[in-house]
Image (cartoon, rainbow, N blue to C red):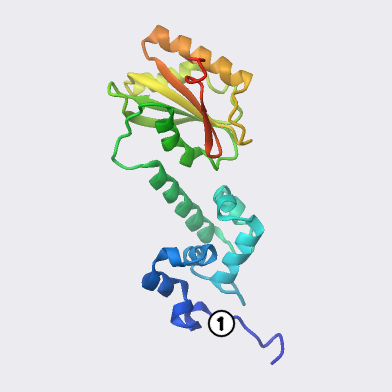
Amino acid sequence: MTGQDRRCPAIREWLPDDRPREKLLLRGPQALTEAELLALILRSGTAGRSALDVARNILRDTGSLERLAALSAREMMRMHGVGPAKAAEVAATFEIGRRVEAGGGERRHVVKGPADVARIMVPTLRDRRQEVFHVLVLDSSNAVAANIELSRGTLNASLVHPREVFKTAIDHRAAAIIVVHNHPSGNPEPSPEDLSITRQLSDAGKLLGIPVHDHVIVAGSDWTSLAERGVL
């Protein structure tokens, strides 16, 4: 048989114990490798390559599932064998995981300290590749009534203005707020701009009677509370 005659057998032609779907149903998802899990999401491969081959190549090119999760759907589409449908399915799967980890749904989070804020926001922000600014609207019992993404881009006074922050707070009838943004660099230390904006927001909140309880900076899986630093 020549090289041109060879073909990659489709997954359906594999032995049942070797097929990712059957393996998952028989032994549970924990029995699958990262490539096999990704292959189940991709569902199909390309000419001469199975979904598992494509999954292995994606993980080889990105280096890890964590790095793949940080890519946008459009960035995934630049990989060989990944079209719009596959990219959308993979991106949606990672987003579902983030929301489950953050504890989304109908359950309200009561914030007792910055660790509770981090538990909510780290899954949402750790993979973002640009700075994103969120406002957590708290009710009178310190439960999160709304989680609003206010802006994207480099944090500065023109991007995050107290007027926009407190308009959001007033619109949602906030008893208090917590602001959160990420550092894509992975360094959780506050910048001079972070400190300046925090003080501006704190002063505005005192005037309006809507206190700013904290400003939390997320950097990867790490975080910093400016309330704990004494800035607020």
Res 147 seen here: yes
Residue positioned 37% across, 14% down in the render? 210
The answer to which of 132 and 196 lies nearer the viewer is 196
Residue positioned 54% across, 50% down in the render? 69
Which quadrant: the N terminus?
Answer: bottom right
> What is the crowding at mark 1: few (fewer than 14 residues within 10 Å), some, or many (at least 20)?
few
Residue 112, how many percent across, how many down? 35, 26
Res 45 seen here: no
Name which quarter of the figure residue 7 lies in: bottom right
Residue 107, how many percent across, how many down? 29, 39
The answer to which of 209 and 64 lies nearer the viewer is 64
- Above or below, 157 against 47 in this view is above
Instruction: Specify whether 55 is left or right of 21.
Output: right
Instruction: Specify whether 118 is left or right of 60.
Output: left
Query: Which structural element holds mark 1?
Result: loop
Please give the count of numbered marks on the rendered protein: 1
Name which quarter of the figure residue 8 lies in: bottom right
Residue positioned 34% across, 21% down in the render? 174
Q: For the residue marked with disc 1, what is the amino acid?
A: Pro
Instruction: Specify whether 8 is left or right of 85.
Output: right
Residue 41, how many percent across, how many down? 47, 63
- Find disc 1 in the rendering and name its residue: 9
Residue 37, how many percent across, how many down? 48, 64
Residue positioned 43% across, 63% down in the render? 30
Residue most toward the top? 207
